Image (tube, rainbow, N blue to C red):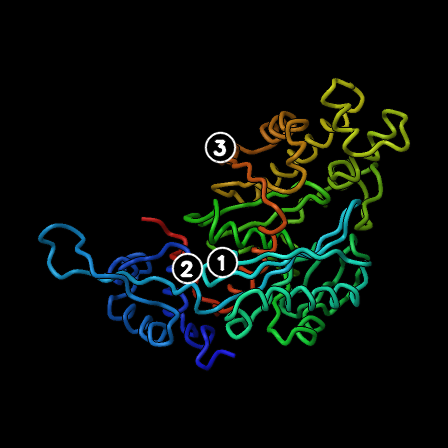
Amino acid sequence: MLQEPTAKTLAATPAASAVLALLLTEGPLSRVEMARRLDLSSTAVTKAARPLLDAGYLHELASERTAPGSGRPVSPLAVTAEREYFVGVKVTTDDLVDEIVGVLCDLQAQVRVSVRRPLPDRSPEAVVVELAALVDELLDAGPDYRARTRNLGIAISGDVDRARGLVRLSARFGWRDVPIGQLAAEATGLSVAVENDVKALTVAEHWFGEGVGTDSFALVTVGAGIGCGIVVDGRLLTGGFGVAGEIGHICVDPDGALCRCGNQGCVETVATTGAILAAARTASGEADMTFGRAVERARAGDEAVKEVFAKAGTAIGLAVAAMVNIAGPERIVVSGEGLDTYDLFEERIWASFAAHAFGAAAQAPVFIRPLPFEEWARGAAAVSLRALFPQVRTHHARALTHRA
């Protein structure tokens, strides 16, 4: 195993945490540039970086001059990607397959190896057994992986208590109050961070994807569920109970169908792949229709089935508009496995969004990002990586994603 000190102890001060996080997301950078972005003195940056350099988490690049005749050359600092590794696991289920998807990432959240394993059933016990086997497979894939890996992130749908590593409720798995963090830690010997899957993907996109450089950012997912992760002032918004961003459970029809969450008329009752399939079967009279067949019928011009997808788009657009009116993100990413059928409800999503978004909020640019489940697992790894950093003051959090 790695010898102490660890990245977590080395980044225990706000300045050290800010320096390491800034280099992770936007490095390499010179000390002078980091001092400017973080509103710190060059001396403070040098002091914060020194133990990280000594322990091999950072390294200096070759000296370079910023301009001809500009004086003393600078030596940019960069993260040493292979100094430590992180495992991320996405536990997923839908009408077709139950599986766990795992990745091993380096310190810059770049995927080094990925593995998928089917789940024999959805019980916590079965998931933990397969998760431990998957982690072993990942750690054995390279000579240094096991010795340099301390942290595991788990991403799963539902109401997750991140601080306690507890899945309070996952309707898709039938779990209630499952201490998955503790169970996984005992099975793997790693430190475990647990997060809602959409929030985990949001962390990865904010730090390493389309959200880099933003203080406010949102990611919306469509597919087996409708989810949303929101970043405000550079931080993932969790709310007082950890469930902020659950736009899939905004009510769009008080007299609508019962949702699996127990409420009535939620967005998910009309806009998930399962809800769309059920409605398409009713509309077509084909009780054994598959989702693929529903897509074919809609694309072929079947008006009844097309209207099912359109209704789903209207509900999603309304939910996104409600989120934008409250949080005001400067950038929005739309992802999820449901993007395979995005053409069938795109028009209604944005018509509904435009009709309900308030004022300038409707101008937020939207990026469509098809992301495989390996990227969701990478999000889980990013959550475990983020756990290295203590809570820092807001102005430091903002500086982490500031662009010149």
Q: State how far apart marks 1 and 2 are (Cα).
A: 9 Å
**Label pair 1/2, CB-CB below 8 angstroms:** yes
Q: Identify the residue at image location x=56%, y=61%.
A: 104
Amino acid on which disc 3 is placed: Gln
Say whether residue 383 is left or right of residue 215. Answer: right
Q: Which residue in the structure is indicated by mark 3?
A: 363
Residue 4 drawn above or below residue 162 = below
Q: Nearer the viewer, residue 235 or 93?
A: 93
Q: CA distance from mark 1 to mark 3?
A: 31 Å
Mark 2, residue position:
24
Q: In the displayed structure, would residue 211 be above or below residue 180?
A: above
Determine whether, in the image, residue 390 is placed left or right of residue 176: left
N-term mark: 1 or 2: 2
Mark 3 element type: helix
Which residue type does callout 2 highlight?
A: Leu
- Pair 3/2: label in front: 2
Residue annotated with mark 1: 109
Kind of residue indicated by mark 1: Ala
Q: Residue at x 67, y 28 (%)?
A: 345
182 up-or-down from 34: above or below: below
Q: Secondary structure at mark 1?
A: loop
On the rendered structure, is 108 left or right of 227? left
